[in-house]
Image (cartoon, coloured by chain):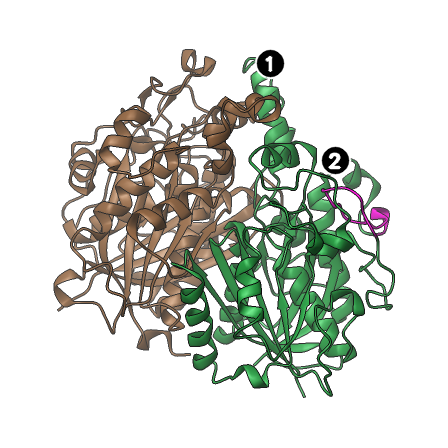
Chain colours: A brown, B green
Amino acid sequence: MNQRKNKVFITGMGIISALGIGVQQNLERLIEGKSGIGPIRQLKTRLSNELIAGEIHYSNEELIDLSGIKNKEGISRSALLGIIAAREAIQNLDFNNPKIRTGLISGTTAEAMTNIELYLKDFLSNNNRNEFIESQDWGFSTEIIAKELGITGYQTTINTACSSAANAIMTGARMIKHNLLDRVLVGGTDALSKVMLNGFHALMIVDPEISKPFDRDRRGLNIGEGSAFLVLESEKIAHEKNIICELRGYGNSNDAYHLTALSPDGKGTAMAMNNAITESGLKTTAINYINAHGTGTANSDLSEVLGIENVFGKNPPSFSSTKPFTGHTLGSAGAIEGVFSVLSIQNNLVFPNLNFSQKMDETELIPETALEKAIEINHVLSNSFGFGGNNTSLLFSKVLS
Amino acid sequence: MIYINGTANISPQPTLRNDKFLADIKQYNTNMLQCIEPDYSVFFKAIALRRMSRVLKLGWAAAKSCLDDAGLKAPDSICVGSGKGCFKNTEMFMSLVNENEEKFVPPSLFIQSAHGSIAAQIAIQSGCKNYNMTYAQRTFSFESALIDAMMLLQEGKHKNILVGGVDEIEESQFKTFDRIGHYKDTNTNNLKLLTYNSKGTIAGEGSTFFLLNNHPTEKTYARIKSVYTFSNPRNNTTTKEIIEAFLERENLSMKEVDLVILGLNGDAEFDSIYYNLMTTLFSENRQTYYKHLCGEYHTSSAFALWLSSMIIRHQKIPKIVDLNEKPLKEINNILIYNQYQNINHSLIFITKHN
């Protein structure tokens, strides 16, 4: 199959993160260089005494209002975040056209947690919280978003931990190329949960301060929450006025190394990046910016930077991690950073890697530390790596008219 | 063309490495059917085995058996569907977090609760470093993995795709969903599942894998022609129309379908959807069902695909799955139709390969 023959365009996007609601607010905060990470106020957790997070400053009740959801019974926070981002993504499109085969593919990894961790005891012993029982799996938020938006076509959820949303975007693009769908809403959603905070804390990879990706003295990640969705459309149906960008490449690999760690030599991460670049038909020298996975943990950052070296040599394009802005939003990270990658292309910007001061011993590579405005950004590679060595890279490209 | 070149099925019936195709049937008098598990020491080293959760064992044991069946050491890509994944560990970790008031929580259960670890474990055990994906969309989980696997084969980069559906049921999840009426009120004899005329079904589980390839081998069971899903149809007429439109796209008439495999699960409220089709669109077809053998679970359509592969291979329909007795000369085309609570509906069309 000649992949270049059937292009996939991005025609809409929406986001809610610790930086704010909507694409515009997120862009402004990225340009200001202001992190959204701070004290944990909404989630009731003992860890709010010692940890910070990229939390969204709205209660569930406020999110219910913002989402405009019709049936709020048994709803989850992830579903609410998802509806808000998804509605923004489709706002300029004729979305419920029955002639257009429309699907929904979402990535999530904490979806099931937020309600169950509160009501697990009830579920097992009484009928007090029965309305939340159905929300305890990963397909729940996807079904809710589909219902709210009136999507009856293909819908699915991917859960490959921190690469879930990137894999959702990749799968959506492939379904368009295979002519199984004309349009697909792709992205992810994850809300802050005690389970994830405690799990990563127990693994001793949470930095009590704002993370320092790629720094020699990095101490770990901050957990974040949020949702982002992108509308992908086939070349056949996309209207020129709606086209924002092209999704030109994607690649996936598995380290087959460990259930939580990446192979430290960077081979798995390099394979995903190489696969995405090969798919796009571009040369590595065409890439202008890499929006790195860059969680701030010892293992993941090393594996990524060695992967970048492996693919691009000693002089790679500008790279940075935007996780010190949003926290690591886990299952939705690939979609949030997908939106940031598109913003980079639209505005010719490289967003800064906050908090970097000293390079690692193992490499000479250093990330971009200030907002870079002087270069034309045509092609951006976005990395997402997950537990189980599940690595995915996406390649976004400017559409030149 | 997409061929099934190997399969293996761990289920509440003796289906693993058993040449007697559904000749021995296990009867249960409970509403929770669990798998007949193999001796795992054949599949894992002793040290690994001690630390591994049950669902990871179920996953690799079926995946390895499937690879053996196809005569392969490792696949080129892995696609897994699982509605619940490692939820049991998530639940245990969650209880620990709550009980210990978020202090002194060891990470081991957290590590093993990652949904993708079933597919990751298969990658580690077989040494497959390529494409690796996990779908979690309730009763679409297996179908999603299957659609992905079919796309991978059409893309031509990988030859041998391992695709499977894995889900487990255990006490706490059973109790939780029983609370909101998913399961029957009284103990059920699984072999009489369709006779109760009451609400709810019986819970089940399974781990079923397939090895798909663009080319047939001596081992080939059948060909997968297409997979289609739809959600929230307005009513039974819409459902019928959607299935008719699917048949039209596949250039297939129901006259050419030798056998339908239906997801009847004994729930009087929702089985009417099947009964409606059995007297209209499917009225001239040989009709079969399978959930009395494996119970209801998110990836039960993987059991149905295994069943259809075996039926085509053996050219024989086991008596235990029959709903009617329409005589058949040859079994070439099989249509699997499954739905759960009228939300997620799926169709899988498979055919004889030669």
Q: Position of residue A337 (x, y in %)?
A: 32, 45
The kind of residue on which mark 1 rests is Asn
The rendered magenta stretch, by its main secondary structure, is classed as loop
Element marked by disc 1: loop
Residue at point 42%, 11% (across, down)? A49
Mark 2 lies on residue: B51
Q: Position of residue B243 (x, y in %)?
A: 47, 71
B37 in magenta: yes
In this view, B275 is above or below A380: below
The kind of residue on which mark 2 rests is Arg
Quarter assignment of residue B169: top right
In this view, B275 is above or below A40: below
Residues rendered magenta in the picture: B27-42
Mark 1 lies on residue: B100
Q: Badge 2, how many Cα within 10 Å: few under 14, some, many 20+?
A: few
User: Same chain for marks 2 and 1?
Assistant: yes
Q: Is residue B265 left or right of residue A5?
A: right
Quarter of the image where the C terminus of chain A is located:
bottom left
Quarter assignment of residue B284: bottom right
